[in-house]
Amino acid sequence: MKINLVKFTVITFVTGIFFSMTTTLAAKVEVKLIEPKKFHDAEVTGKSRGQSIEDVEAALTSLFQAASKGVIKDSENLIVEVTDLDLAGYMERAWKNTGKDIRIVKDNDRYRLEFRYQLTDSDGKVLKEGEQKIKEFLRNVPVRKAHNSPQLVSYMQDDVEEWLEKSFK
């Protein structure tokens, strides 16, 4: 019985060390919204301002995490602090007397994403930092794709990927 307890303890310890090593080796991308209530436009159809901010932060986090794969090394961490945002389109209030707001997005709409960034290594040493403004027209995006969904900011994907490639490869 004593030997089984020792084996269990050793296996648990080794597994814990292995797990902590594998989780620290994966690239970490963190997105923070800085004073989001001051953003030009971060409202999502059918959501309160607070819930819209949470949804936009989650969508931007997913976007940057996906776009950074293969660009940011596994041993590096990227922190993105969004300082202003203007989503494509505009909010139309109380659409057709339903009491629900709706985002109107047209092919020639622009969006803007302003942020600070910091790339660090596994020891926390700053490798690169700066500020970036992405201001673009929608490109080849079906109007409904920008509607309230997990694809909330998917139209930014190409521009974020392009920025990451130019900045970190």
Image (tube, rainbow, N blue to C red):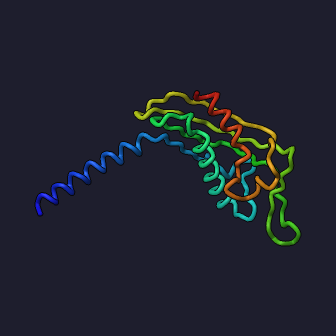
Q: 99 and 23: which one is in front?
A: 23
Horizontal side of 151 relative to 122 (left or right) equals: right
Q: Is residue 97 above or below residue 131?
A: below
Q: Is residue 117 above or below residue 2?
A: above
Q: 99 and 108: which one is in front?
A: 108
The picture quadrant where one finds residue 22 is top left
Residue drawn where x is 18% and y is 55% of the image: 7
Residue drawn where x is 81% and y is 40% of the image: 137
Q: Residue furthest bottom?
A: 98
Residue 143, x across and y down, in percent:
82, 52
Residue drawn where x is 58% and y is 29% of the image: 168
Residue 157, x across and y down, in percent:
69, 42
Residue 16, x across and y down, in percent:
31, 50
Q: 38 and 16: which one is in front?
A: 16
Q: Is residue 123 above or below residue 89?
A: above
Residue 42, x across and y down, in percent:
72, 52
Q: Residue furthest right?
A: 96
Horizontal side of 108 relative to 133 (left or right) equals: right
Question: How many callouts does the rendering have?
Answer: 0
Q: 79 and 107: which one is in front?
A: 107
Q: Is residue 16 above or below residue 120?
A: below
If the image is split into quadrants, where does the C terminus sit?
Answer: top right
If the image is split into quadrants, where does the N terminus sit?
Answer: bottom left
Residue drawn where x is 44% and y is 30% of the image: 125
Horizontal side of 132 relative to 101 (left or right) equals: left
